[in-house]
Image (cartoon, grey):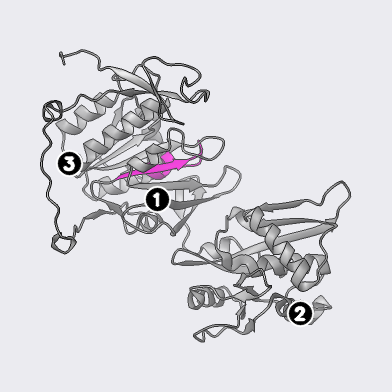
């Protein structure tokens, strides 16, 4: 190929994989609309052109040496926890989140920490000017001279800078602003995002360069760009929350070098993101105790226990079909739990609107919160408060049974640390964790933990 000649490209459909030499609004193969994206045609190697294939021998798995990679700390405890103990050297990490959630703030803090500890860090910014990035850096801390800023949106510029200087960490803010001249499409398009991400992966692996890539999400909550972008990188970290809550939740959606069940909690302050060590205390409102319709769930996020408040409200349906709404809890699972309450516990909710909310903006995925959700709904419907200073942890089955969940010792310890003297859980446990109340069925838990008069539990 002649020097300076633009490589050829074709357009293919992301739905069926069909190819076309020109772009079309509708795929000529499957008929899908707006699915044609541009892709560069890679030149085949000379050996492939002659039909020669290099020989690769199979080896026994027991003869393969275990790779022991080195991890780079971001010196942010919550961030390192989510990454599995730090960023794996030579890995590519995608940080996804809504615009304005604090991704750039998190990464500038991590970049400053790494540079202050002797690492050569390059911060490639395409969304903000160097002055804006420097102003944020000075607002959140004391910048180090080892942190270099590169205002560039051209991928070739970033590659030349990496090749010229021996950087150890590269931060790209953001992948939607980066583009390559190999493609004619605009920056931020599906083909540009995928091609730039693939080039960054190829740049990082042979050099042992650790790359952090910031990416925005769409209105549906997906990272902007093709799904294959998430398959290219080694880890995908989601930064959750909104501008109306001071808390930000960091969780790994994918991690080749660590767990995907860990959770990091931050609080947004004027001087940046502050790590929240005692996260459970922030998600609980203890003033005056809990009234009817409230229950405290002891849940696990990875290896970390949390206590969160579950709020429920039931009211007589006035218009049409009864409403079932949940914030921070899966709506499908809520419908299942309501059916169990009706069929197994005799609590009629067919003419009731049911609303469930997880206080503090927390999003629960642990099935151990089932028992707390059911008790909160029953408490609201029967107008009977839950026993004071009692946390709940247990999965509810379709038969109305309460099933044990993992990590009961840590759930119990976290409950005790926050002043909860009682923990209600399943009675079928293989080990004694010291829980006060044990129930085999949901109906027994409702009878034992809800009172006829709230004053009985306030003494």
Residue 114 in sight here:
yes
Q: Return the disc, 2 or 1, that comes first in the chain's sequence.
A: 1
Q: Quadrant of residue 374?
A: bottom right
- The numbered mark, 2 or 3, whose residue comes first in the sequence reads 3
The residue wearing badge 3 is 206
Neighbour tally class for label 3: few under 14, some 14-19, many 20 plus, Cα within 10 Å: few
- Residue at figure coordinates x 41%, y 45% from the top left: 106
Mark 2–mark 1 Cα distance, whole angstroms, equals 42 Å
At 56% from the left and 38% from the top, the residue drawn is: 220
The local secondary structure at tag 2 comes to: helix
Q: Is residue 255 left or right of residue 114?
A: right
Please report the residue visible at 23 percent of the width from the left and 40 percent of the height from the top: 204
Residue 112: x, y in percent? 32, 44
The answer to whether 45 is drawn above or below residue 143 in the figure is above
Q: Percent x, y for residue 383?
A: 82, 68
Most extreme residue toward the right, as rendered?
318
Q: Is residue 103 magenta?
A: yes
Which stretch did the figure color magenta? 92-108
Left or right for 322, reference 205: right
* Residue under pointer 2: 447
Location of residue 378 with respect to 217 vertically, above or below: below
Q: Quadrant of the N terminus?
A: top left
Q: Secondary structure at mark 3?
A: helix
């Amino acid at each position: 190929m002649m020097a300076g000649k633009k490589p050829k490209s074709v357009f293919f459909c992301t739905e069926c994989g069909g190819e076309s030499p020109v772009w079309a609004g509708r795929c000529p193969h499957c008929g899908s609309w707006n699915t044609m994206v541009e892709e560069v045609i890679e030149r085949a190697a000379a050996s492939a052109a002659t039909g020669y294939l290099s020989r690769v021998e199979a080896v026994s798995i027991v003869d393969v040496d275990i790779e022991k990679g080195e991890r780079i700390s971001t010196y942010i405890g919550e961030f390192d926890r989510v990454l599995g103990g730090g960023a794996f050297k030579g890995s590519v990490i995608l940080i996804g989140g809504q615009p304005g959630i604090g991704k750039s703030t998190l990464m500038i803090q991590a970049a400053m920490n790494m540079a202050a500890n002797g690492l050569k860090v390059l911060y490639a910014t395409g969304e903000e000017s160097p002055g804006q990035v420097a102003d944020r850096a000075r607002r959140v801390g004391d910048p180090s001279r080892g942190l270099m800023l590169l205002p560039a949106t051209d991928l070739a510029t970033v590659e030349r800078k990496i090749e010229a200087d021996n950087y150890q960490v590269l931060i790209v803010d953001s992948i939607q602003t980066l583009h390559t001249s190999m493609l004619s499409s605009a920056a931020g398009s599906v083909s540009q995002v995928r091609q730039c991400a693939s080039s960054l992966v190829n740049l990082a692996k042979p050099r042992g360069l650790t790359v952090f890539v910031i990416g925005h999400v769409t209105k549906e909550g997906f990272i902007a760009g093709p799904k294959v972008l998430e398959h290219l990188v080694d880890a995908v970290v989601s930064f959750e929350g909104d501008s109306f809550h001071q808390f930000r939740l960091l969780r790994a959606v994918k991690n080749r070098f660590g767990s995907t069940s860990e959770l990091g909690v931050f609080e947004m302050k004027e001087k940046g993101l502050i790590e929240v060590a005692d996260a459970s205390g922030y998600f609980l409102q203890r003033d005056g105790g809990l009234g009817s319709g409230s229950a405290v769930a002891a849940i696990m996020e990875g290896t970390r226990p949390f206590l969160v408040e579950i709020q429920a409200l039931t009211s007589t349906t006035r218009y049409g079909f009864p409403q079932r709404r949940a914030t921070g809890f899966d709506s499908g699972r809520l419908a299942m739990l309501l059916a169990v309450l009706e069929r197994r516990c005799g609590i009629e909710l067919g003419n009731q609107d049911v609303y469930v909310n997880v206080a503090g903006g927390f999003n629960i995925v642990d099935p151990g919160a089932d028992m707390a959700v059911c008790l909160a709904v029953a408490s609201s419907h029967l107008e009977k408060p839950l026993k004071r200073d009692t946390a709940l942890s247990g999965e509810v089955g379709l038969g109305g049974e309460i099933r044990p969940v993992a990590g009961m010792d840590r759930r119990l310890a976290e409950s005790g640390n926050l002043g909860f003297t009682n923990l209600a859980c399943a009675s079928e446990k293989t080990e004694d964790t010291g829980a006060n109340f044990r129930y085999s069925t949901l109906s027994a838990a409702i009878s034992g933990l809800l009172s006829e008069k709230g004053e009985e539990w306030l003494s």
